[in-house]
């Protein structure tokens, strides 16, 4: 039979002392979303920095954050970050495959269908956030609105609607970045400096 000291040592061994992965996932999503939204606003071109960011930071970094959330037994964080990580890698693939001659370029209806299924995921995640803090609710609502606007832009071909999506994307990405950086700032200062 273990005494109290041995039990406490064993419990410490079982405790998860790893870093909070949410700031990484949120910052990766936020910055990549802002960068692509600058494309939708016509400020920058859809070029190698955007594709590289989608693969490496928006994609791989979010997947790593999601796997860390899995280790912490956080199904919401796991699903959110792994899913959106693969969203960004898939987005990069959609842009690269036609250039490489491996697939036809997508038509607007193809992109609208692609985005629509992601809208279903965003809606489900938004419903989950109704039990979480308000800033996360607003962020997921902004993501859902972004997807709806981009679907409308693809189906109508409207540049004005696409620019509206660019604005909404900057809002959604900015909110994610705000939460991610806010969590780290609060942790480093060991007090609530940024309300998240």
Image: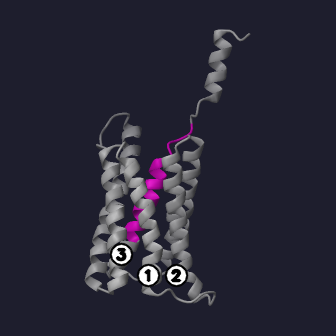
The residue pinned by badge 1 equals 46
**CA gap, disc 3 and disc 1:** 15 Å
| Residue highlighted by disc 3 | 150
Question: Residue 40 lies in what quarter of the image?
Answer: bottom left
Let me know if residue 57 appears in the view.
Answer: no
Per the image, label 3 sits on a secondary structure element best described as helix
**Main SS type for the magenta part?**
helix
Residue at 62% in and 90% down? 101
Question: Which of the two residues, 76 or 174, is positioned nearer the viewer here?
Answer: 76
Query: Which of labels 2 and 1 is toward the front?
Result: 2
Precedes in sequence: disc 3 or disc 1: 1
- The reply to whether discs 2 and 3 touch (Cβ–Cβ < 8 Å) is no
- Give how far apart the Cα atoms at labels 2 and 1 are: 9 Å
Q: Nearer the viewer, mark 2 or mark 3?
A: 3
Residue drawn where x is 40% and y is 67% of the image:
33
Q: Position of residue 160 (x, y in %)?
A: 25, 82
Q: Position of residue 100 (x, y in %)?
A: 61, 87
First in sequence: mark 2 vs mark 1? 1
What kind of colouring is applied to the model shown?
one colour
Q: Position of residue 47 (x, y in %)?
A: 47, 82
Q: Which residues are magenta?
A: 18-35
Q: Is residue 73 left or right of residue 115?
A: right
Is label 3 or label 1 in front? Answer: 3
Q: Earlier in the sequence, mark 2 or mark 3?
A: 2
Disc 2 target residue: 95
Q: Secondary structure at mark 2?
A: helix
**Residue 32 is covered by the magenta coloring:** yes
Discs 2, 1 touching: Cβ within 8 Å: yes
Residue 161 sits inside the magenta stretch? no
């Amino acid at each position: 039979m273990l005494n109290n000291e041995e039990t406490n040592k064993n419990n410490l061994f079982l405790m998860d002392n790893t870093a909070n992965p949410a700031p990484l996932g949120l910052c990766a999503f936020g910055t990549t979303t802002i960068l692509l939204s600058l494309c939708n606003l016509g400020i920058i071109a859809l070029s190698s920095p955007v594709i590289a960011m989608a693969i490496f930071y928006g994609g791989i970094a979010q997947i790593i954050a999601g796997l860390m959330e899995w280790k912490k037994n956080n199904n919401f964080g796991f699903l959110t970050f792994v899913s959106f990580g693969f969203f960004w890698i898939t987005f990069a693939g959609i842009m690269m495959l036609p250039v490489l001659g491996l697939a036809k370029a997508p038509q607007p209806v193809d992109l609208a269908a692609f985005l629509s299924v992601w809208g279903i995921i965003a809606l489900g995640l938004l419903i989950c956030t109704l039990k979480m803090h308000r800033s996360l609710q607003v962020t997921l609502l902004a993501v859902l609105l972004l997807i709806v606007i981009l679907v409308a832009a693809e189906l109508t071909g409207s540049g004005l609607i696409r620019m509206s999506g660019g604005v909404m994307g900057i809002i959604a990405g900015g909110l994610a970045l705000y939460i991610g950086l806010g969590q780290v700032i609060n942790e480093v200062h060991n007090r609530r400096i940024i309300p998240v």
